[in-house]
Image (cartoon, rainbow, N blue to C red):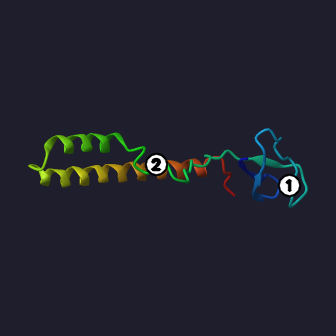
Amino acid sequence: MPTYEYMCEKCGYEFEQFQGITAKALRKCPRCGRMGLRRLIGAGAGIIFKGSGFYETDYRSESYKKAEKSEKGTGDKDSGKKGEAKAETKSKDSKAEKKLNAAKERNRNRGRINR
């Protein structure tokens, strides 16, 4: 069951409500008792894999896969290049993570009414 965010347009009270997907949106504010609630649009939650069988290496980025293939083809001759490829892949992955986190923050703030 999802958790929905609500905000009262009359008194500004914000809260979260655990509801079923088919449940109707709330209308009456629990704080002021007036009919002024609005369901806010959220970005949703990320999927969390728990338990054995799911590993962080299951869903690697394309740049990581390419670097891994190039490492396998070079053998031990180019061990210096291996380190460079790994460092480059890590920096690309961290840049992608930063962009993803910034997008998540923007989505979280979208739909909220400034007071």
Residue visible at 42% across and 51% down in the picture: 97
Residue nearest the observer in this picture, 48 or 22: 48
Q: Is residue 45 left or right of residue 17?
A: left
Which amino acid type corresponds to the residue marked 1 in the rendered image? Cys
Disc 1 to disc 2, C-alpha distance: 34 Å
Mark 1 crowd level (few <14, some 14–19, many ≥20, 10 Å Cα): many
Q: Which residue is mark 1?
A: 29
As drawn, is 42 to the left or to the right of 80? right
**Label 2: which secondary element:** helix
What residue occupies the far right of the structure in this picture? 33
Q: Nearer the viewer, mark 1 or mark 2?
A: 2
Rendered residue at 68%/51% (across/down): 113
Please tell me how crowded label 2 is: few (under 14), some (14-19), or many (20+) other residues with Cα within 10 Å: few
Precedes in sequence: disc 1 or disc 2: 1
Q: Quadrant of residue 114?
A: bottom right
Q: Residue furthest front?
A: 52
Q: Amino acid at mark 2?
A: Leu
Pick whichever, 112 or 50, lies toward us. 50
* Mark linked to residue 100: 2
In this picture, residue 55 sits left or right of residue 4: left
**Left or right of 25 on screen, residue 84:** left
Q: Position of residue 100 (x, y in %)?
A: 46, 48
Quadrant of the image for the C terminus?
bottom right
89 vs 70, nearest the viewer: 70
Q: Residue at x 78, y 48 (%)?
A: 19
| Residue 69 figure quarter | top left
Give me the residue at 21% from left, 49% from top. 85
- Total count of labels: 2
Give the label on residue 113, or none.
none
Q: Residue 10: x percent and y percent?
A: 83, 54
